[in-house]
Image: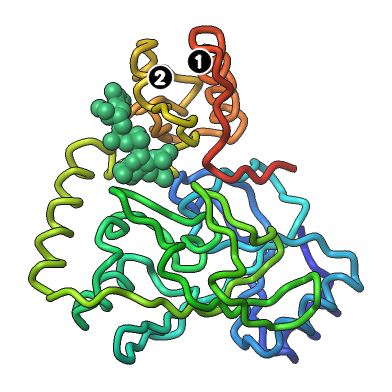
Amino acid sequence: MRVSDKVATRLGELGAELRRGVSLAEQTSLGIGGTADEILLRRYEAIPQIMRLLAEKKIPHKFLGAGTNVLVADGELPFVVLHLPSTGPGMRVEGNVAYVDAAADLGAAVTFCAKHDLGGMEGLIGVPGSVGGALRMNAGAYGTQIGPHVREVELYRAATDEIETLRGSDICFDYRHTSFVSDDVMLRVKLELPPKPYKEILADIKVCNEKRRGSQPLNQKSAGCIFKNPPGGSAGRMIDELGLKGHRVGDAMVSDRHANFFVNVGRSACTDMLKLMDEVRERVHTAYGIELENEVIVWQN
Ligand code: EPU
């Protein structure tokens, strides 16, 4: 979607940067997605005014973090994309508490805390994405989830049209699901982490990295796991058992390394990836009676 020149001028006055006709294929780890105008929210304080402006002008919008867990529709998109650019490291530590900007890279945050002898997040080291994205999805891997470490989140809430601070205990963190709503804009987080010597954290990080390298297609375009694991089960194992590794629709393919990673092996269209997801979901349902739920967030027209 394109915003009018009048709205563009107003956005500029509010300290936001407008980028015209941005390709979402270039902004997402799957390398799939059409084009839209993108608004870079450079001043947190102006976010409520910008959101009010978009509401007033009836401009639909979606918030994009690092783009590592999203499948975006093809063509001209009927919304604008909001993005919080990273401005510098955005992290500091006081005692066993870390204050991290939502725009910061998750892996960088894990390493930064480790250097301050703060552990607890080792398993998250290879999870691609921003800290904000990790909060929204309650990212997890190798027995670690971000949720239990969260003490406070500063965010813009569309529901109240204000920047608020929520206590960690007031946020519900479940398996790849939280009580945040889609138009909440994460700004900063306060994490409380267990003290642990840097060397020990590094050793544990190394183990996680090796496991990940040994089982996941890290050099291909993907959004990580495409489906959530059903309770007590493994989506990857079921898809593998059905012999679907390497199964393709156009350039969308079930990874031959990890069956719950769907990769874009060329110039996959969103429609091809969705068709592949439907086909696999159907096969799993027929064979196991289980309806797989998307782990990836889908932005359809
Ligand atoms: N398996 C197969 N074939 C496959 C893939 C897996 O048989 O093609 C088997 C494995 O051998 C293992 C079991 O399935 O016995 C589980 O596999 P894995 O250890 O790879 O974990 P996962 O359940 O598939 C989850 C998360 C990953 C996270 C890893 C490591 C979900 C949906 N996935 O994968 O997270 O990295 O554990 O903790 O919860 C993501 O969220 O995007 C993601 C990749």
The residue located at (80%, 60%) in the rendering is: 60
- Left or right placement of residue 117 versus residue 73 in this view: left
Q: Give how far across and how far down residue 198 sits, in percent.
A: 13, 75
Quarter of the N terminus within the rendering: bottom right
Q: Secondary structure at mark 1?
A: helix
- Dot 1, how many residues are within 10 Å of its Cα: few (below 14), some (14-19), or many (20+)? some
Quarter of the C terminus within the rendering: top right
Of residues 43 and 37, the one nearer the viewer is 43
Of residues 49 and 75, the one nearer the viewer is 49
The answer to whether one can see residue 40 in this image is yes
Tell me the CA gap for discs 2 and 1.
7 Å
The residue located at (50%, 48%) in the rendering is: 176
The residue carrying mark 2 has its beta carbon less than 8 Å from ligand 1: yes
- Dot 2, how many residues are within 10 Å of its Cα: few (below 14), some (14-19), or many (20+)? many
Q: Quadrant of residue 129?
A: bottom left
Of residues 101 and 35, the one nearer the viewer is 101
Three-letter amino acid code at disc 1? Val
The answer to whether one can see residue 224 in this image is no
**In the rendered image, which residue does mark 2 sit on?**
239
The residue located at (73%, 89%) in the rendering is: 14
Q: Give how far across and how far down residue 216 sits, in percent.
A: 27, 38
Report if the CB atoms under discs 2 and 1 are less than 8 Å apart.
Answer: yes
Q: Secondary structure at mark 2?
A: helix
148 shown above or below 225: below
- Left or right placement of residue 67 versus residue 149 in this view: right
122 shown above or below 68: below
- Disc number at residue 284? 1
Mark 2 or mark 1, which has the lower sequence index?
A: 2
Q: How many marks?
A: 2
8 shown above or below 266: below
Three-letter amino acid code at disc 2? Ile
